[in-house]
Amino acid sequence: MGRILVVDDHESLRKGLVTALTNAGHDVEETANGTVAIERLQDSQFDVVLTDMRMGGTDGMDVLHTASKVQPHAAVILMTAFGSIHTAVEAMKIGAVDFVQKPFEIEEMELKIDKAIELRHLKHQVEYLRDSQQGQYDFDRIVGASGALQHVLGIVSKVARSNSTVMIKGETGTGKELIAGAIHHNSLRASKAFVKVNCAALQENLLESELFGHEKGAFTSADKQRIGRFEQADGGTLFLDEVGDMSPSTQAKILRVLQEHEFERLGGTRTLRVDVRIITATNRNLATMVKEGRFREDLYYRLNVVSVEMPPLRDRKDDIAALAEFFVKRYANELKKRVEHIQPDALKVMMRHHWPGNIRELENVIERAVLLTDSTSVSLADLQIGEQTSTHSGERTTVVKIPPTGIPLEEIERQAVVEALKMSNWIQKDAADLLGISPRVMNYKIKILNIEIPRSRRPASEAVAV
Ligand SMILES: Nc1ncnc2c1ncn2[C@@H]1O[C@H](COP(=O)(O)OP(=O)(O)OP(=O)(O)O)[C@@H](O)[C@H]1O
Ligand SMILES: [Mg+2]
């Protein structure tokens, strides 16, 4: 039901409309005067504006002009007297959605109003979906300035506008799906569908019916025809997630779509043609699966035209702070809480954490922290990751494993120092803290153990000297 403004100087007609529409459940306002109607449009939101064309003074055209300016989403329906069809057509050009000629049946008007409200609703939905999808996949929503991520984004922005198949590799939670979406939404196919299928979630024939559709009666439970994902993605992009988990039969069918652009629905005889770009993702080693004969080599090469490797979060520690701040903002907003920062010691522990679940794990940790915290900043206690980060879970665990052939103590020391430096993102003072030594001793160890600091981590003066 909607909010409707009825504008007509003909009192009995106006009253009749108001009664009928109110009885139908709408929220109705009325006025006999175009000038008052314009004031109402400036003050209050309406779904539908029903206006007479010719009234003394300000007429229906003026009402329409105002509505299209101040409430572009409101649907304007004009009521015209016999003989003014020409004006009505002009009005439709300006943006009226419909018109009725007087005299009319109330039922006819009700139908037009229902249609206008539904249309408005659909338009809203489409806009919302477009905004939310587009927004979610904009390149600038992909957080991270680290060299590793920028390298990925560099490849992605180069290939987005081509039709090449792209294979995105990487551990769980590294952002594979996000990158796939970014490629689609920055491609020439952006206005068409981005369709996702998780190949690991379904058994062979269910997966095939999902991908290619089926005809009625193709198998016992196929009680009606079904359009598959390839058809839905026509003109757009199909994202095959966990592509390593496909049976040989499904692999063969996908290869055929890639080569010939055609397939049949299960149980169907008609050959269908589609134009679909394929992006795949996997956290398995497909090259090894090819060697072991578990994945078709020809399909692998077809899918792997462009290959993108998502770096694990522990290899791009530079991104942790920015990602954490990003998720704090997102969840503070979502949970309607005033949480603005992360305390320095909490951030320090996050830098040391191993992040086996990568960005998804970081996102979950922050979501929980924002939910739990009583303050405006996230503290170490809110994070609940300190315990898992290292080995202090009560009793001492063995951290050094000595090979049967033995190992020089110096090598163990070297490994410990390198590990501490990596965990601290090569900040020597933090690495020293981890090992319970002073920064001076740390500096000394680095020198005598001949540990090479990555070029990007050297102090500026040294970098210049090199
Ligand atoms: N660089 C990034 N900036 C902002 N958010 C990110 C980034 N990378 C990943 N995310 C977010 O992290 C979560 C996990 O990402 P995504 O689902 O793309 O990972 P995935 O590699 O597909 O994981 P899986 O292998 O488990 O399916 C998502 O909520 C995603 O929006
Ligand atoms: Mg995924």
Image (cartoon, grey):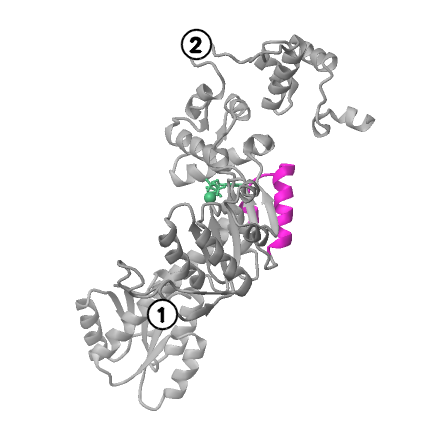
Answer with left or right where residue 274 lies relative to residue 218: right
- Count of picture labels: 2
Answer with left or right where residue 335 lies relative to residue 341: left
Residue 346 in view: yes
Q: Is residue 153 magenta?
A: yes
Region in magenta: 139-160
Q: Position of residue 392 (x, y in %)?
A: 46, 13
Q: Is residue 350 above or below residue 235?
A: above
Q: Secondary structure at mark 2?
A: loop
Q: Quadrant of the N terminus?
A: bottom left
Q: Measuring 44% from the left and 69% from the top, which residue is drawn there?
A: 271
Residue furthest front in the image: 293
Amino acid bearing label 1: Ala
Q: Is residue 290 magenta?
A: no
Q: Is residue 394 above or below residue 163?
A: above
Res. 215 image quadrant: bottom left
Sort mark 2 into few (<14), some (14-19) or many (20+) by Cα contacts within 10 Å.
few
Residue position for label 2: 395
Q: Measuring 72% from the left and 11% from the top, which residue is drawn there?
A: 444
* Dot 2 beta carbon under 8 Å from ligand 1: no
Q: Measuring 41% from the left and 26% from the top, which residue is drawn there?
A: 375
Residue position for label 1: 75
Q: Measuring 71% from the left and 30% from the top, which residue is drawn there?
A: 456
Majority secondary structure in the magenta region: helix
Q: Position of residue 60 (x, y in %)?
A: 37, 78
